[in-house]
Image (cartoon, grey):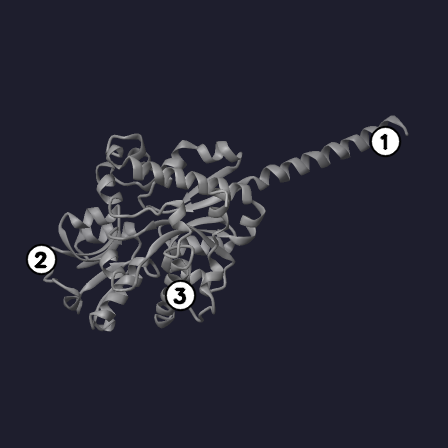
Amino acid sequence: MNLNKRLSMQCVAAAALMICGAASAQSKEVTFAHQDMLVPLRTVMESGELEKATGYKINWRMFGGGGDVIRAMASGDVQIGEAGSSPIAAAASQGQDVKLFWILDDIADAEALVVRNGSGINGMKDLKGKKVATPFVSTAHYQLMVDMKLEGVDPKGVNVMNMRPPEIAAAWERGDIDAAFIWDPVLSKVKSNGKVIATSGSIGKKGYPTFDGLVVSAEWAAKNEAFMVALVKALARADQDYRANTAKWTADSAQVKAVAKWTKADAKDVPAAMALYRFPTATEQLSATWLGGGAAKALTDTAVFLKEQGRVQELKPNYGAFVTTVYVQKALGK
């Protein structure tokens, strides 16, 4: 074999190794869609601990609502995303190949219907003829419509407006809307000159609970199991730190500053806002209340509502197929 031919073959082999190496490096990258919910996960994002533990490059991308997150996942631009139970139910109903693998939070009282001072609204029945803003297909939208139905309010008589959180904040500031069903950081702003007449917690007690969850492309998760398990472990640690040291999560603490930074919230509002949520432990995640059955029921009930609203075309026979306990079990060594 002559020298030129040998060098040529060596170059081909080297190029092949570089391509394989690039492909391997590329596979250790994930785009994670987050929103502005005030949750302990933000401390994981700030610390970079997950990147260090896994060697993955994580592209943290902020979205204005769960519907936007689900659309980005459907397009393949995002592999993991934060979304409320309503957008997740919509994704499942549309047949998206996603799995709910972690309950980010039990919304409890962290979403609320706030009415402007002087609006003359004292209860759900007073919403007739009023302008009420909420992000459509969100958990807040779901509970707003459910509670109006439970209270005998005809939704056709209420001007329910589709707005993202920043748009609600601006509209409230201008005096363009009478009420809003929303979450923090906008919730704290509208509460300053308004009053709460219903919360996600009060409506949840009527049989319609909501939650925020983490969903993942099922195909991507299957190929990146080690990352998924490391992510769940990091989530569990962050939540445990909050539960064990809530009093230390003050406005000037590193944890709260991280939450404020990643959500664009005011640090002074974060501690009180976070106290409105509940963060299930890893063991509770596996219980019948959550991934062990309750989440699937909530998705089923929400999907029925979405179909009634014309937001989805068909219902799936089993919403449990879109929920997995695999990664929490492996993180717990089960």
71 lies left or right of 5: left
Q: For numbered disc 3, what is the local secondary structure?
A: helix
Residue 324, numbered circle: none
| Crowding near the residue tagged with mark 3, few <14, some 14–19, many ≥20 C-alpha atoms within 10 Å | many
The residue that appears at 24% across and 61% down in the rendered structure is 203
Placement of 204 over or under 104, stated as above or below: below
Q: Earlier in the sequence, mark 1 or mark 3?
A: 1
* Closer to the eye: label 2 or 3: 3
- Mark 2 or mark 1, whichever is nearer to me: 2
Residue 118, label in figure: 2
Q: Is residue 126 left or right of residue 61?
A: left
Residue at the right extreme, as displayed: 1
The kind of residue tagged 2 is Gly
Mark earlier in primary sequence (2, 3): 2
Instruction: Please indicate whether residue 277 sits to the left or right of residue 301 in the image.
Output: left
Whole-percent x, y for residue 225 in the image: 55, 45
